Image (spheres, rainbow, N blue to C red):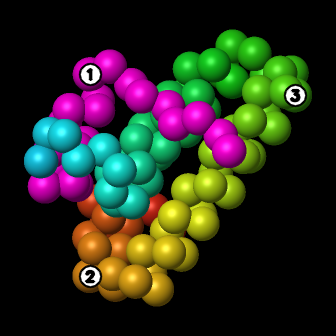
Amino acid sequence: MHGIFIATSPTYSSTAEYGGGAGNTGCAAVQVALMTERINRLRRGHFSMHAGDRHGHRGLQCLISRRRRLLSYLRKRRLIMYAMVVNRLGLRR
């Protein structure tokens, strides 16, 4: 089982915005939002400086696939929450 990434400042805004409360970090919508923030930060910051980091690219692909699985779970279980998350985050699904 993989560990969950916990950011410092974006966590509070994402949990309050997507999870309904500041302490609800286990909600699938909050996890998708946190992963999207992390993916965007890696793409903009790290890989612009370190384009040849192949191990980092593999980790990025793992994050993207985990987010995709969470989004498919949301689409099956809570369609309204799925549509809200996709629209707010600007994902192409």
Real-space Cα separation, disc 3 to disc 2, in angstroms: 37 Å
Circle 1 packing at 10 Å, graded few (<14), some (14-19), many (20+), is few
Residue 45 % position (x, y): 56, 20
* Image depth: mark 3 or mark 1 in front: 1
Occupied quadrant, residue 46: top right
For marks 3 and 1, give the CA distance: 28 Å
Q: Mark 2 points at which residue?
A: 80
- What is the quadrant of the N terminus in the image? top right
Badge 1 is on which residue? 9
**Position of 34 relative to 90 (above/below):** above
For the question of whether residue 83 can be seen, the reply is no
From the viewer's perspective, tell me whether residue 76 is left or right of residue 14: right
- Which mark is in front, 3 or 2? 2
The quadrant where residue 79 appears: bottom left
Question: The disc labelled 2 sits on which kind of residue?
Answer: Ile
Residue furthest to the top: 49
Tell me the element at label 2.
helix
Q: In this view, does 34 lie above or below 8?
A: below
